[in-house]
Amino acid sequence: MTDTNTLPPTLASEEIIADRPGPTQPPHGGTIATRARSLPASLAVAAVAITVSIPVLVIVWSIVQPSPDVWGELWATRLPRMLRDTATLLVAVLVGTLVLGTSLAWLVTAYQFPGRRLLGWLLVTPLAIPGYVLGFVWLDTLQEPLGARAVRSIWLCALVLTLTLYPYVYLFARAAFREQSQRAVDVARSLGCSRLQAFWKVVLPMARPSLAGGAALVGMEVLTDVGTVRLFNVSTVADGVLRVWFGTGDRNAAAELSVVLIGLAIVLIAIERLGRGRARYTQGGARQGLAVHRLRGAGATAAAMAGWSVFTVTVALPVLRLLTWTQEARRTDQTATVAGDLGFHLLSSFRVAGVATLTCLALGLLLVAGLTRRRASGRALARLATLGYAVPGPVVAIGVLITLAALDRTDALPDGWLLVGSFAGLVYALVVRFLAVAYQGIESSVGKVSPSVIASARTLGAGRFRVATRIELPIAGAGIIAASVLVAIDTLKELPITLLLRPFGTETLPIWVWQATSESLWVQAAVPSLAIVAVGMVLVAALMWTLEHGAATSS
């Protein structure tokens, strides 16, 4: 079975992470994931699942009570173009990321060439660069030679999003290729298949579940993007939600338009499930990785140039351009203002991302401890608690806003307390959106602990707490750290939720970039963009170290 410790835990699916009952179950329960059976724990888990799912269910309720006037106006004006542009952009980016991510993963997994090991990790670094940052860099770079009209197109927007999001597919595909056995390829070669034919007929089909998981992540990111599409004047449904909200102030219209995004997300999930099928791939005997073919001469040069060209376009040149703009800000005596703004926005970003990450981690541990995935009730609560990740950010923001406004109108809160426009409301929305990342990473890692190991420890007299802290959590530590890093990366770059729900005085780095780029102030946008990239690079390096450590440990 595919080793999910080497995969990004964001989308560790049930098809890949199957429950593995052992021959001997530990006494008084099981692992962390199956031990908390008491009524208080069950009530706590149910409360968390319901609380984080309410904003999404509020939006879904709009389907039951539609407004004919709103839908009539949307169909007559904006909605057809929004649907067309969203579908075109989604298909283009999915195809681009699947081709680019899979090709690069196969290149660094199956072939040996100069700089291969370093390049293998550098190709993940575009995760640290938000699409709206890469977008405005290349928008300004290409505007003079190509013209403003040619640059602001859906196809260049799709290219920018492809270059930003391909690491999701790359990580999944690389892990899948590394876990495959050379034996299957040797059998195919013995039957007359060439190396290329063996890749198409054996290696690629076995990686299909992982590729479908990576593509689903890319699709969700495309559906939720508002910063990049706004730069290129692409009218997507997500951007339409913001335009309706800020342009008309009609909360009901924005909520009903959000239903379209939920429908698109459901269709995307269904396609991902069909792409996985019921495929489960196992290996017998000792694991033997794919043989690495050493390239020489022109082949080695071409492979190195292909990989380094992608890194140059996605990371090196944009960072160099941002540094140039930063130097221009210093020459124009903007350094004092920029330094003050940078410290303020950086602290705000750290505060939002830090609190949201810790909250997601704590609730993820609680869910893993309290849920029993083998039971129908446990599976239902798990799906309910992670529903927010399948919903684009603007939809979550609208749902949270409606939910908190309803609470503010009740007598449940102390006098003078308001949740709308509060820091707690913003963190709540981020938890609704990204709790699934923490939960799936923790659940997949804890699920790898053998029940026989737990049973042995309990037989030797170890208590439940000691088993959890001395055995389960250390074994699952890499997955927990990776999940935390992924949540931190996501919350650091998050734009639509923060844009809609940020309280007064909370201005994050993405908000600074959004405000500057909306007025084409590239020099002012360079400083916060560099800060996002720098922090993101540190987080991506931590993620890569964690995944490598997890892979080495599982080996």
Image (cartoon, rainbow, N blue to C red):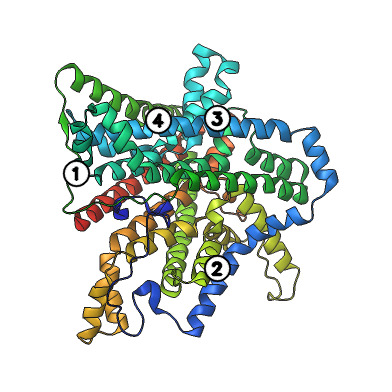
Residue underneath mark 2: 49
Q: CA distance from mark 2 to mark 3?
A: 42 Å
Q: Is residue 480 above or below residue 315?
A: below
Residue underneath mark 3: 521
Q: Determine if residue 53 is in view.
A: yes
Q: Are marks 3 and 4 in contact (CB under 8 Å)?
A: no
Q: Secondary structure at mark 4?
A: helix
Q: Nearer the viewer, mark 1 or mark 3?
A: 1
Image quadrant assignment for residue 206: top left
Residue 455 image position (x, y, % from top left) = 25, 79
Q: CA distance from mark 4 to mark 2?
A: 37 Å
Residue at the spot x=20%, y=32% of the render?
A: 189
Give the mark, 4 or 2, whose residue is nearer the N terminus.
Answer: 2
Give the mark, 1 or 3, whose residue is nearer the N terminus.
Answer: 1
Give the mark, 1 or 2, whose residue is nearer the N terminus.
Answer: 2
The kind of residue on which mark 1 rests is: Gly
Label disc, if present, on residue 289 of the rendered structure: 1
Residue 442 image position (x, y, % from top left) = 38, 63
Q: Are marks 1 and 4 in contact (CB under 8 Å)?
A: no
Q: CA distance from mark 1 to mark 4?
A: 23 Å
Label disc, if present, on residue 99 of the rendered structure: 4
The kind of residue on which mark 3 rests is: Leu
